[in-house]
Image (cartoon, rainbow, N blue to C red):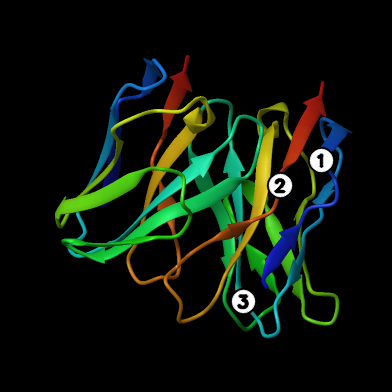
Amino acid sequence: AQTIHQWPVAEIKAVGSPLSLGCTIKGKSSPNLYWYWQATGGTLQQLFYSITVGQVESVVQLNLSASRPKDDQFILSTEKLLLSHSGFYLCAWSPDNTEVFFGKGTRLTVV
Amino acid sequence: AQSVTQPDARVTVSEGASLQLRCKYSYSATPYLFWYVQYPRQGLQLLLKYYSGDPVVQGVNSFEAEFSKSNSSFHLQKASVHWSDSAVYFCALSIPGNTGKLIFGLGTTLQVQP
């Protein structure tokens, strides 16, 4: 069975500090990978997607970047956090652009 | 542009009562449609999905949804709710053959009263 693991579970970071969030998918080779963001109490918005190692497409510009250094790993990062980056970040995967499965998310609070 | 509308921000029902959560979509053809549930401080869990065929689809925990092309709707239903069903429910669509990008509605918070 496939599993998706996100880290960290939660972060409290200062404005202007760097950020790195990660997720790993096990049990599925060459999955499509996605980062979604959910503002507190809001809906979900796709930020990035990747269909293969080394290739990442940006969907929404939020002064964030993403990378896929390995087939099973997806990283979300920024060098300088803004207050508006606060929220819930969800990594997700799909075997074939149909069903999408989500990780448990990382709650980010920027202070 | 594609969109998903969940007209009810909050629904309150009594335990054991039936439930319908509404979802309307906007897309020129038939999209893939999904219902996800989010429990407090957790990720999303897929409840059910519709790709094509039988308009009534069964999901986990006795949830079902009915697709209506004429009404551009995909309402979620349950015959008898339990207090543990209290959560936020999201309707979403994706475009067949696209990148798997999900477009979500704003969500409906379901509160089940004992």
- Per the model, the C-alpha gap separating discs 1 and 3 is 23 Å
Left or right: B7 with respect to B25?
Answer: right
Bin the neighbour count of mark 1 within 10 Å (Cα to Cα): few under 14, some 14-19, many 20 and up.
Answer: few
- Per the model, the C-alpha gap separating discs 1 and 2 is 8 Å
- Per the model, the C-alpha gap separating discs 2 and 3 is 18 Å
Q: Residue at x 46, y 47 (%)?
A: A36
Instruction: Give the residue at the far left of this rendering.
Output: A70
Q: Position of residue B9 (x, y in %)?
A: 81, 40
Q: Can you identify the residue that label 1 sits on?
A: B9
Q: Chain of mark 1?
A: B
Q: Chain of mark 3?
A: B
Q: Amino acid at mark 1?
A: Ala
Residue B91, disc: none
Contact (Cβ within 8 Å) of mark 1 with mark 3: no
Q: Amino acid at mark 2?
A: Leu
Q: Amino acid at mark 3?
A: Pro
Q: Is residue B42 visible?
A: no
User: What is the count of numbered marks?
Assistant: 3
Q: Earlier in the sequence, mark 2 or mark 3?
A: 3
Q: Chain of mark 2?
A: B
Residue B31, disc: 3
Residue B106, disc: 2
Q: Earlier in the sequence, mark 1 or mark 3?
A: 1
Do the dots labelled 2 and 3 sit on one chain?
Answer: yes
Q: Which of these two is toward me, A73 or A27?
A: A73
Q: Is residue A32 visible?
A: yes
Q: Secondary structure at mark 2?
A: loop
Contact (Cβ within 8 Å) of mark 1 with mark 2: yes
Quadrant including the N terminus of chain B:
bottom right
